[in-house]
Image: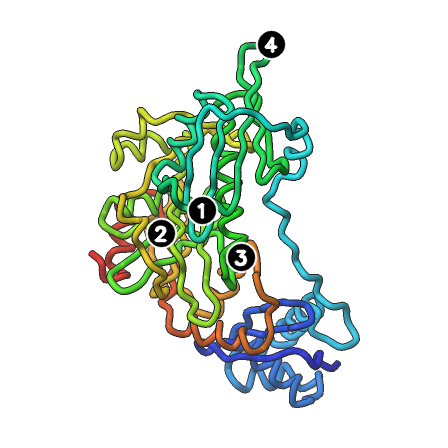
Amino acid sequence: MRLRADLALLPLDGDAVVFSEEAQHLLHLNSPAALLFRELQKGTPASEFAHVLAAEGLVPSGEAEQWVTATLDAFTACGMFQDGPVAPVVLRPSPDGDAEAARCAPYASFEPVAEERYRLLETCALIRFGHVAQVRLVRSIVGHLATDDHVVPTITIDISAKMRDDGHLRSDVYRDGLPVGWAPRLSEMAPIVKAALWQSAINAHEFLFYIHAGVVGTGAGCVLLPAAAGSGKSSLAAALVHRGFRYFSDEVALIEPDTFHVSPMPLAMCIKSTGWDLMARYYPEILSLPVHVRIDEKVLRYIPPPADSLEQVPMPVRHIIFPRYEEAASNRLERVNRSEALGRLMNECLALRQRLDQTNVRQLVRWIAGVECYELSFSSLETATQLVAEATGSG
């Protein structure tokens, strides 16, 4: 029973992280599992594992054998042994919506009724509209990113327009002449344009990790709010900004190489219909904003961020807070071990710009060792913002 040669054990917060360069896999190990890994590295006979763990007081003697068996099975499943399978590299699905792009009409040039330029990170998009009704809806999502006409565009987004027999305006969206998506009615058009802009901006930007997270700024740094869809991170980010935190993003955290700073991605705050009444307590204007429908059929409104969000600069991460909204949950903010937090953070990683190796993984571990990590369970947005403010010293 021999470990793979490419595995590296990196201590973190009394636990450890195991990295496999071949599988591009990071695995959090608690203290007993880390000790078992070290015994495997030393060549300790498997028959002695249970005794070693019990002698260290990490596992009750009556449970040690069962615990060792379960842990070795987990190591095998994660591809850690030479004679076992390699853990598969997890590939995230492309966000480009290839199926929707395939339904676009063939690109044809048209005379635009309006042209506007919008800038996000290093990307400047020239957007050309086929119908005047499209302009207002696109502005309602990205209008705060408008820039001067003298800025040279790096991409061109064309939005064609065709009136359907049912009276709805069909819009086909193209980026540099290539299809992106189509909308059978106006309400579905602007989210496609937004996606084309921010995907282009991300692809043109230098980053190490693209994390699905809200980001808000404090005095000397920023707070990551990594979570899956439906966890309340956008509403939490919006409420924190209303409280006085600086706005970076409600869904995108781009972590830079070497410094691990996070660049601002000030897209409009996206609020689903289920959260409109709640958000109206903080942003009363939300109830009068245009209604949009996303490709996943979610009904949305977009709150423009504060004007100063465009002036933010990349900032170091001081806190990582994993939010989870539950209707009947008690409001709790609890510390999370950094090795566990690293695993949870990587679960929300949507893209890697660079291949992981021992050098940048060691940098990653050193980075998170200086970050305060928490999980937040909440049912009250007001209480949640207070807990975050207290934990970050911003209360």
- Tell me the kind of residue under disc 1: Val
Residue at 44% x, 31% y is: 115
Amino acid type shown at disc 3: Cys
Q: Nearer the viewer, mark 3 or mark 1?
A: 1
Foreground tag (2 vs 3)? 2
Q: Residue at x 33, y 57 (%)?
A: 333
* Between 144 and 73, the one nearer to me in the picture: 144
Label 3 SS: strand
State the separation of the CA atoms marked 3 and 4: 43 Å
Q: On the rendered image, what quadrant is the N terminus found in?
A: bottom right
Residue 305 in view in this figure: yes
Residue identifier under label 4: 165
Which mark sits nearer the N-terminus, 3 or 4?
A: 4
| Mark sitting earlier along the chain (2/4) | 4
Above or below, 16 relative to 190: below
Secondary structure beneath label 1 = loop
**Mark 3–mark 1 CB contact (< 8 Å):** no
The residue at the point 40 percent across, 50 percent down is: 265
Residue bearing the label numbered 2: 248
Foreground mark, 1 or 2?
A: 1
Compute the Cα span from label 3 to label 1. Answer: 32 Å
- Up the image or down, 276 lies above or below 17; here it is above
> In x, y percent, where is residue 350?
55, 54
- As drawn, the label of residue 152 is 1
Q: Which comes before the other along the chain, label 3 or label 1?
A: 1
Q: Earlier in the sequence, mark 1 or mark 2?
A: 1
Which residue position holds label 3?
A: 349
Q: On the rendered structure, is 253 left or right of 164?
A: left
